[in-house]
Amino acid sequence: MQPRPLNEAIKPISWLLGKWVSEDGKGEYPSIKPFNYCEEITFESYGQPLIHYTAKSWHPIEKKPMHFESGFLRIQPGTNNLAFMVAHNFGLTTLEEGFVSENEIVLESKSIARMNFAKEPGVKKIARIFKLTDEKLVQVLKLETNNTSLEDHTLATYKRILDR
């Protein structure tokens, strides 16, 4: 699909647009052993007042798929308030809200729903930061479950491989 004119509402978050790839993702959590992953994330604009988001990760050696996400990032026009609606392949949907400052987005879950046969433990809270630094995008994700408090979960640094 060809790029469309940028909707005025998303200009404060337009620095996210494009395809980003990370080969150095690291994950940890008190209930699992540490792991590494590669990930590709895409932020696309189709001229509407929102950004379409997709993410797919894979094992760095075995190349097996690991995690998928898809959703929409919206900004409240004329403000720095954001809403990030995400569906995860393991049976979770989240509504995260927060704000954007110059080159940083800070989000925290406001609602989480999960299918009744999703794997335990249940996710209770997500906190996420996207930050642009020296033309690289960093994503930090924290997670709280039924068994653990809010803890660091994943950290990845991405380089842009395709502009919007």
Image (spheres, rainbow, N blue to C red):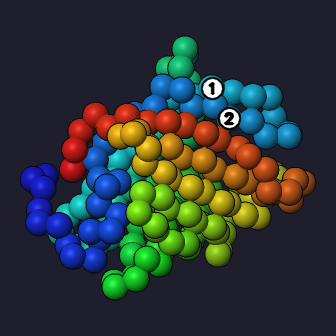
Q: Residue at x 63, y 26 (%)?
A: 36
Mark 1 burial class by Cα count in 10 Å: few <14, some 14-19, many 20+: some
- Horizontal relation, residue 44 to residue 137: left or right: left
152, 113: nearer the viewer:
152
Is residue 39 visible in this depiction of the protein? no
Query: Farthest residue in the top direction?
Result: 61
Whether the residues at callouts 2 and 1 have beta carbons within 8 Å, the answer is: yes
Residue 34: x, y in percent?
A: 75, 28
- Give the residue pinned by disc 1: 36
Examine the rendered structure and indicate whether residue 35 appears above or below residue 69.
above
Looking at the rendered structure, the kind of residue marked 1 is: Asn
114, 15: nearer the viewer:
15
- Give the residue pinned by disc 2: 27
Q: Of the two numbered discs 2 and 1 on the same chain, state the one appearing first in sequence.
A: 2
**Mark-to-mark CA distance, 2 and 1:** 6 Å
Q: Residue at x 35, y 47 (%)?
A: 42
Q: Residue at x 85, y 39 (%)?
A: 31
